[in-house]
Image (cartoon, grey):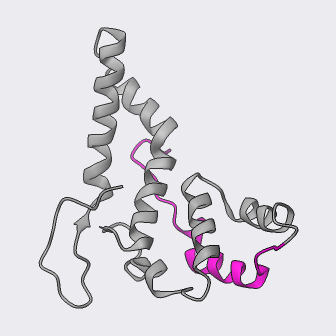
Amino acid sequence: MSACACPVEQQADQPEYVKRVDEDWPREAARFKWIESERAGYDLGEAAIRRWVKDHWAGYLRARWVEHLQGNCFWVELDRGDYGLLQREFLDCPTLLDQIVSRIKTGQENLTLLVWAIWNCPEAPPPTDRMIDILEAIDINGRRLSNQFDP
């Protein structure tokens, strides 16, 4: 994933790139609408936008959130304290952190990650206490954003 395209003047505590989800997601949805309308041979209108929201909103937001956590792009709607968290914390367990982040990118949640750690790594399970520290700091469940189509 590439860095954000809108550089800002950087200070010591300020991110290099700043973007807004509420300005970015409509472009992604419009691109989807255009592609789907081309396939259909006519303008699918708001129905295509609603389909993008239904099918892609969670994945889109998850990707933006991971960019924010990794310090690749500062997303205004996300917690400022989370920006670059993965570059500052948990430096003692980079392999475990990489495994967790790669699974988060695919949409996995806390319980799925813990089950993976316990059941899929029987020969050398990751330290559960450290994994819980990481999951609590990342706080998947506390970082959900809604969209204008949510009731």
Point out the residue furthest to the front here. 123
Query: Is 108 drawn above or below residue 134 in the view shown?
Result: above
Give the residue displayed 18% in from the left and 88% down from the top: 11
Give the residue displayed 62% in from the left and 83% down from the top: 93
Give the residue displayed 29% in from the left and 16% down from the top: 38
Image x and y of residue 97, in percent: 59, 74
User: Magenta span has 133?
Assistant: yes
Q: Locate the N terminus and report the quarter of the image it occupies.
A: bottom left
Left or right: residue 54 compared with residue 114: left
Q: Nearer the viewer, residue 122 or 150?
A: 122
Give the residue displayed 36% in from the left and 21% down from the top: 36
Image x and y of residue 133, in percent: 67, 83
Image x and y of residue 14, in percent: 24, 83
Point out the residue furthest to the top here. 41
User: Magenta span has 102?
Assistant: no
Left or right: residue 135 compared with residue 21: right
Q: Which residues are magenta?
A: 124-151
Residue 142 quadrant:
bottom right
Image x and y of residue 143, in percent: 52, 66
Query: Is 103 drawn above or below residue 8 in the view shown?
Result: above
